[in-house]
Amino acid sequence: GKLLLEMGKLYDNRLRKLSKAMLYYQRALEVFKEMKNYKRIGDTLSFMGGVHAKKRAHKKALKCFKDSLVLRKIGSKEETADTAETYHNIGNCEAKLGLFEDCLHSYCEALKIKKKIYPSDMLSLSTAKTEHCMGLALLQLGSVIEALGFFMPAMEVRQQVLGSEHLDYAFSLHNVGRVYFHQGRVDDAIVCLEEALRIKKSKLDNGHPSVAETEHVLASLYIQKEDIATAIPLLKSALSTYKGKKDCDIMKSDIFDLLGKAYSIIGIIEDAILSYKHSLKIKRAVLGLDDVACANVLMEIGKLRASTGDLNEALIAFKEVKRIHKEVYGKEHLRNADLLIQVGLIQEKIDNDDMAFRCYTEALRLRQLLLSENHFEIAEALAHVGKIHQKRAEHFKSISIFQEAIGIYRDPNNKKMMKECADVCRLLGMSQMEISDTNNAFLSFERSLKLRERVFGKDSEEWAEVAYDIGVAKAHIGLHDEAVELIEHFISMKRTSNNQDSNNLSNALFQLGLLKSKNRCIDEALPLLQEALKIRRMQDDNELEISEVLFQIGCIHEAKKDYLESLVCLEESLQLRQSIVGDDEIAGDTMLKIGEVHRIR
C-alpha cells in the first residue's frame, strides 16, 4: 500500500501524469481499505482529491477531501496539520465552486487548528496561506475591510520568511492592491500592483496569466487617473496573454471594455467603438443576447455613436438596451432612467425638445421613486429638465428647478459632483440674467467660477467660459472695462485651445466688438465684428446671427462715414432678417437706419 501510494505521488508531483497517478492511488486505497487503516485511507483520498482539483473536477475533489477529513478524524483523535490542510483544501474547492460562505467556514476551521499547532511566536507560511485565502473569499463577498485584515498579516509573514522577491509575496501585494482599488485608494493600489508586477515579471514566463491579471487591474487604475498612455500598453499585453488561454473569454471582454473607455477618453472614438464591439461579441457568445452585461456595452456604444453625430445608430443601440432592460428589470428600474437620459440628449440634438422633455421627466420620476431624497442622480435629471424649460424661455420654472438641483449638490466633495454643480450654477445664472435678476445672476456665476477653478484650474477653458458669462453680465450693468477684460481673456483662451468651438468664439468676438463700439473705440471694434461675421458665415442655419453682426458693422461704417459700405451691410442684414422672421421690430429699426444713412449721404 505504501509503495503504491509513493508511485502515485511520483506520477502526480514529479511526472505530472495525473491519470497514471490516479490508478496507483485507487489501488493503494483498495489495500488500505482491506487493512481498515483509516488514517492511510484518509491520506490517499486527500491525494486523489488533489488530482481531481488539478483536473478542475472540483465537485469530485470536494467529495474526496470531505471523505478524507472524516477518515482522518477517525484515524487520529487529535487535530493535526493534515486535518488543517484538509479543511484548507475543502475551502479551496468550495471557493472554485462559488460557495464563498462555505469556504470561509472551512478556512476558519483550518486557521483555528493551525493557530493551535504553531506557537504564537512562530511565523507560519501555512497560516499565512490560509489567511490569504480567507481574504480572497471575503473580497468575493464584498467584505473589503475584513479582507484587508487577513491579507496584511499574510503578506507580512511571507515578506519576513520568504523575502521581498518571492512570488507568494507578489501575490499578497496584488491582492492588497485590489483591496485598495475597491476602497478608492488609487495611488496606494498602484504602488502595490506595480511592485507585484515587477516581481511576477522577474519570476514568471512571458504570457503567464498571473502577470496578465496584475496588468489588467493596474491598467484600470491608470484609466481612473486618465493616464491612458500607461494604461493601453498594459491592456494590450494582458489581452495578448488572455487570447492564448482557455476560459478567459470574460477577462478578454473586460479588457476590450477598458480599451473602449481608454480610447474614448483620448477622443479616438472609432477605436473605442471597435473595442466595445469586440467585447459585445464575446459577451453575447458567452452570456447570451439578453444579459445585462451586453446592455451595458451597447449603452457605451450608443453614447459614442451619439457623440460622433451618428444618431440613428445610437438610437438603434439604445433600443436594444431598452429591450434587455425590460426583459431583465421590468419598467420601474434605475437603469431605465439612465437610458432615458441618453435618449433625451439625442432628441435634443435633433431639436425634438418635447420628446427630450418627456424622457427627462420620466427619468426624474424613476430616480425620485427609487433613490434617496438627496441623491446626486436626481440633481442630474433636474438639470436636464431645467435646461428644456430654459430653451422654452420658461425662466421662472428653470430657476426653480436649477435651485432644487443645487440644493441637492450642496457642498460637492468630488470632482464629478463639483463639475456638475458648477454647470447647474452657470445655467441658473443665465436664467436669472434673462429675467434681469442681475445680483443673483452674479452670485450664481461666481459660485460656478469657484467650483470650476477647483476642478479645472484658473487657466482652464472651463474657468474662462464662466468668466465670459460674468463679463457679459457686467456689460449689462455698465461695467464695461471689467467686462472687456473678462471677455478678452476668454477669447485668448479660445484661440489657443484645441477645442475650437466656433460658435462660442464668434459670440465672444461679437460681445467684445459691441463693448468697444460703446466705448467709442470703433477702430478696435470693427476687426472683432468682421472676424465674428467670418465665423458665422461658415456656420449653417444662422442667418439671424449673421444679420445681427452685419447691422453692427453697418453702424460702425456709418460712424466712420463709409456710407456705401454701411448701406451694403445694413441692406444685407435687413434682407436676411426678413427672409427668416419677416417685418418685425428689429427689421423696422434696420429700415430706419438705412433711411438715415441715405439722408446723410
Image (tube, helix red, strand yellow):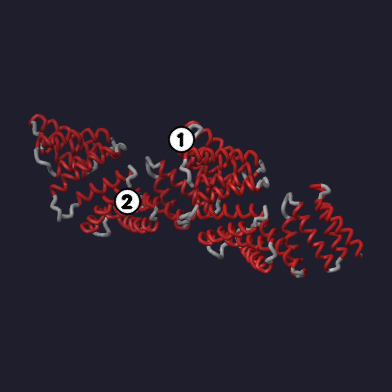
| Residue 10 shows in this picture | no
Dot 1 corresponds to which residue? 291
Three-letter residue code for mark 2:
Asn
Q: Are marks 2 and 1 in contact (CB under 8 Å)?
A: no
Looking at the picture, tell me which residue is in the foreground, 374 or 70. Answer: 374
At numbered mark 2, what does the secondary structure look like: helix, strand or loop? helix
Q: Report the residue at 83% width, 65% height from top.
A: 557
Marking on residue 175? 2
The image position of residue 98, as x and y in percent, is 31, 37
Marking on residue 22? none
- In which quarter of the view is residue 448 placed? bottom right
**Is residue 7 shown above or below 431?**
above
The image position of residue 550, as x and y in percent, is 79, 58
The image position of residue 543, as x and y in percent, is 77, 51
Three-letter residue code for mark 1:
Asp
Label 1 neighbour load within 10 Å: few <14, some 14-19, many 20+: some
**Can you name the residue that lies furthest to the top here?**
34
At numbered mark 1, what does the secondary structure look like: helix, strand or loop? loop
How far apart are the two marked residues, 2 and 1, measured between alpha carbons? Answer: 29 Å
The image position of residue 518, as x and y in percent, is 75, 66
Q: Is residue 203 left or right of residue 556?
A: left
Q: Is residue 503 left or right of residue 235?
A: right
- In which quarter of the view is residue 444 placed? bottom right
Q: Report the residue at 63% width, 63% height from top.
A: 490
Q: How many marks?
A: 2
> Which quadrant is home to the C terminus?
bottom right
| Residue 550 shows in this picture | yes
Q: Is residue 509 left or right of residue 267?
A: right
**Is residue 503 shown above or below 384?**
below
